[in-house]
Image (spheres, rainbow, N blue to C red):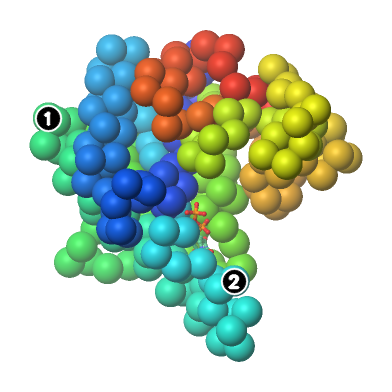
Amino acid sequence: MVVDGRRIVLKLSGEALASSASDETIDAIVVERLAVEIAETRSDLGLELAVMVGGGNIWRGTTGAGAGMDRATSDTMGMLAPVINALALQDALEHHGQPTRVLSAVHMAEVAEPYIRRRAIRHLEKGRVVVFAAGMGNPYFTTDTSAALRAAEIEAGLLCKGTHGGVDGVYSADPRIDRNAVRYDEISFKEVVAKDLRVMDLTAITFCMDNGLPIRVFDLMSPGNLAKALAGDAIGTLVR
Ligand code: UDP
């Protein structure tokens, strides 16, 4: 175990790779900015950094299920979406000189390495960024839960959840609706569950609670925040 918390899993939602400024599913300018921040922060702080990318910019299982599709099939489509995002992120990271490996939970030998826990750890030890793709490979789950699972598996000290919707942490209510909502600097897992606060899905939260894995929730889209979150600075909200 990396006891000083320098092994971190960063969860990036698929929608964080898109932007309102472009109609594209993946905005190259946004990916580029994130890649530069990830590469520079990793090297400045000497981190072992793994990224779990989501796929919500392309497909969500619940979308198809809501339209009458078989849920497992729709979720499988959802799992393929992060593979596309992971390749975009890998490309941008490597353009900035950051060696990167995409490890997919769904085997696709021509495209990405298979996820093998020991291999992921070895890549991290060598200073490569690992991008986890295809969630955990099982329908009915999310990439948030997959990020929590992988973080526990590789014995990461922290899970960083970057938000992109303008909400910079965990609030007592949705600040976009309730002007009196207050942001917590720190909050316990139990309180998040009891108050039904929407940090991550409940499966991810209870998994982190059971496994003592703290979560830092922060606004990813504000430049400089990623470095602060990965450095352990008190930004956004710490859930533990
Ligand atoms: N998904 C899944 N199993 C997993 C990870 C993801 O079935 O282990 C599917 C699920 O349908 C989900 C979609 O992939 O809606 C995209 O992932 P997610 O919604 O977590 O992406 P994000 O919101 O982070 O962009």
Q: Residue at x 43, y 51 (%)?
A: 15
Quarter-wise, where is residue 127 in the image?
top left
Label number found at residue 215: none
Is residue 116 visible in the rendered image? The answer is no
119 shown above or below 224: below
Q: Of label 1 and label 2, which has the lower sequence position?
A: 2
| SS for dot 1 | loop
236 shown above or below 173: above
Q: Nearer the viewer, residue 158 or 32?
A: 32
Is residue 218 visible in the rendered image? The answer is yes
Q: Is 67 positioned to the left or the right of 116 in the image?
A: right
| SS for dot 2 | helix
Q: Which residue is mark 1?
A: 97
Q: Nearer the viewer, residue 105 or 67?
A: 67
Q: Which residue is mark 2?
A: 62
- Going by the numbered disc 2, the residue's amino acid type is Thr
- Cβ(mark 2) to ligand 1 < 8 Å? yes
Q: Nearer the viewer, mark 1 or mark 2?
A: 2
- Going by the numbered disc 1, the residue's amino acid type is Gly
x and y percentages locating residue 181 in the rendered image: 77, 29
Q: Nearer the viewer, residue 163 or 7?
A: 163
